[in-house]
């Protein structure tokens, strides 16, 4: 089941509400990435406290480990990982792309050696739909070929991007047919491909719209292209998708990318950046990025962000309303230098809270009709520096 309501617009930016089998998602939204059935460094309870509405799982990796027999035993991914809110699963296409020379793509599907134990495996559009049906994810992604920015040292040509895009379209038809055969009651999204070529993006988009998917994603960005190329495709494609269906930009990105994406008409985002960067001491704040490993933080008593209400910055609120203060930059710097696991955990809580709060502020600005004013203030704050 999927129902999308467009509640308000400002320019191309959209405020919406997405109803799925496991709950309601307010858009625009950022979706934390939980590749192996867990968002690294945080508990499900922490995700709920920071008001995460929907998280990701990964078809490819969950197929490898723990395997479908285990997840089937639990009736799907929700009960297995103890998360009762919506889940979106990637189809495995990006992971296949990342295998590089280790995989062989044909019309039928992709043959590759398991990165876990070396077993010879074969992933097809049909198998991807079967796996995701066992996972019981609320949003299922079609199996596609992620068009690379470069092929063996040269930029992908128009002809190469076209061949890849047309293969993804044929796979989209097969995904749609298998999804229907399986009587999957969740929602299947098509993925717009076409590389860095606008005319191919438009052809892919038109063909997918003819297939009438419940929602659409924009894939093939954040695959090594320069930032300006990604921004060009992000500005070109979203508003050409049907207005009455959700739009998802895959694998993007920085806080600035999210704000620009919303301005271009995107409803949904995901990226490993807030969690991956947190594990490397790279923090996002209202006033710019903070590199925790820098020696200047060694004795700094301030929190990461004085305007942030996350557990790392503010601590906890007692029943009487009193606040037990958060953690200083000095303490987090110390944890980082010592390799203590608490450091990445607290940093991950902060980064995810920052991203989710940013999206909440965007939604509120759209509701108030002041998104453009929000964009201006956002840029000023981020440029101010920590």
Image: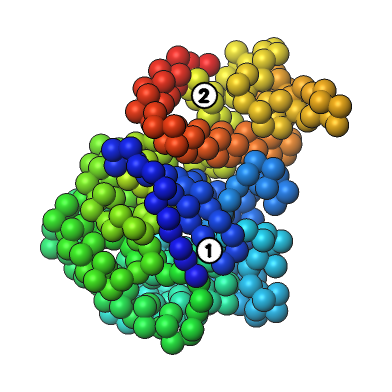
Instruction: Check disc 2 and report the residue beneath it.
Output: 286
Left/right of residue 82 with respect to residue 103 in the rendered view: right
Vertical comparison of 74 with 241: above or below: below
> Which residue is located at x 36 percent, y 47 percent?
266
Vertical comparison of 155 with 286: above or below: below
Direction bottom: furthest residue: 181
Looking at the image, which is closer to me, 239 or 149? 239
The x, y position of residue 39, in whole percent, is 62, 51
Q: CA distance from mark 1 to mark 2?
A: 31 Å
Looking at the image, which is closer to me, 120 or 183? 183
The x, y position of residue 318, in whole percent, is 84, 30
Vertical comparison of 64 with 11: above or below: below
Vertical comparison of 40 with 279: above or below: below
The x, y position of residue 179, in whole percent, is 43, 80
Mark 1 / mark 2, whichever is N-terminal = 1
Q: Could you tell me if residue 164 is visible in this image?
A: no
Looking at the image, which is closer to me, 107 or 55? 55
Left/right of residue 249 with respect to residue 136 in the rendered view: left
Left/right of residue 325 with respect to residue 380 in the rendered view: right
Instruction: Check disc 1 and report the residue beneath it.
Output: 20
Say which element carries label 2. Answer: loop
Left/right of residue 329 with respect to residue 266 in the rendered view: right
Looking at the picture, the colour scheme in use is rainbow
The label nearer to you, 1 versus 2, is 1
Looking at the image, which is closer to me, 46 or 295? 46
> Which residue is located at x 70 percent, y 52 percent?
44
Say which element carries label 1. Answer: strand
Quarter residue 41 falls in: top right
Check disc 2: other Cα within 10 Å, few if <14, some if 14-19, many if 20+: many
The x, y position of residue 134, in whole percent, is 57, 77
Check disc 1: other Cα within 10 Å, few if <14, some if 14-19, many if 20+: many
> Which residue is located at x 38 percent, y 70 percent?
143
């Amino acid at each position: 089941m999927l129902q999308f309501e467009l509640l308000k617009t400002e320019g191309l930016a959209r405020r919406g509400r997405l109803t799925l089998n496991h709950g309601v998602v307010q858009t625009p939204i950022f979706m934390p990435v939980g590749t192996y059935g867990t968002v690294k460094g945080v508990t499900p309870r922490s995700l709920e406290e920071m008001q995460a509405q929907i998280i990701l799982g990964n078809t490819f990796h969950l197929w490898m480990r723990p395997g479908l027999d285990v997840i089937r035993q639990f009736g799907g991914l929700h009960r297995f990982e103890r998360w009762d809110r919506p889940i979106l699963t990637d189809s495995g296409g990006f992971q296949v792309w990342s295998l590089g020379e280790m995989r062989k793509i044909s019309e039928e599907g992709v043959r590759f050696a398991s990165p876990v134990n070396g077993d010879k495996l074969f992933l097809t559009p049909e198998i991807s739909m079967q796996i995701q049906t066992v996972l019981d994810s609320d949003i299922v992604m079609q199996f596609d070929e992620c068009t690379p920015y470069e092929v063996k040292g040269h930029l992908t040509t128009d002809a190469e991007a076209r061949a890849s895009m047309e293969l993804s379209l044929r796979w989209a038809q097969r995904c749609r047919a298998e999804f229907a055969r399986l009587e999957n009651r969740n929602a299947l999204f098509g993925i717009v491909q076409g590389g860095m070529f606008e005319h191919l993006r438009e052809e892919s988009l038109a063909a997918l719209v003819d297939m009438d998917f419940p929602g659409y994603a924009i894939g093939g960005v954040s695959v090594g292209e320069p930032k300006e190329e990604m921004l060009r495709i992000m500005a070109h494609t979203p508003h050409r998708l049907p207005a009455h269906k959700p739009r998802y930009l895959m694998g993007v990105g920085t806080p600035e990318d999210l704000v620009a994406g919303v301005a271009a008409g995107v409803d949904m985002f995901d990226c490993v950046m807030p969690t991956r960067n947190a594990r490397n001491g790279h923090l996002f704040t209202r006033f710019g990025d903070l590199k925790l490993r820098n020696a200047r933080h060694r004795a700094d008593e301030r929190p990461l962000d004085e305007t942030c209400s996350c557990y790392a910055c503010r601590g906890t609120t007692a029943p009487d309303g009193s606040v037990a203060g958060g953690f200083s930059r000095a303490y987090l710097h110390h944890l980082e230098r010592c390799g203590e696991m608490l450091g990445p955990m607290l940093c991950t809580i902060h980064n995810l809270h920052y991203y989710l709060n940013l999206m909440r502020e965007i939604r509120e600005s759209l509701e108030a009709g002041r998104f453009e004013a929000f964009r201006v203030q956002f840029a000023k704050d981020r440029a101010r520096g920590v």
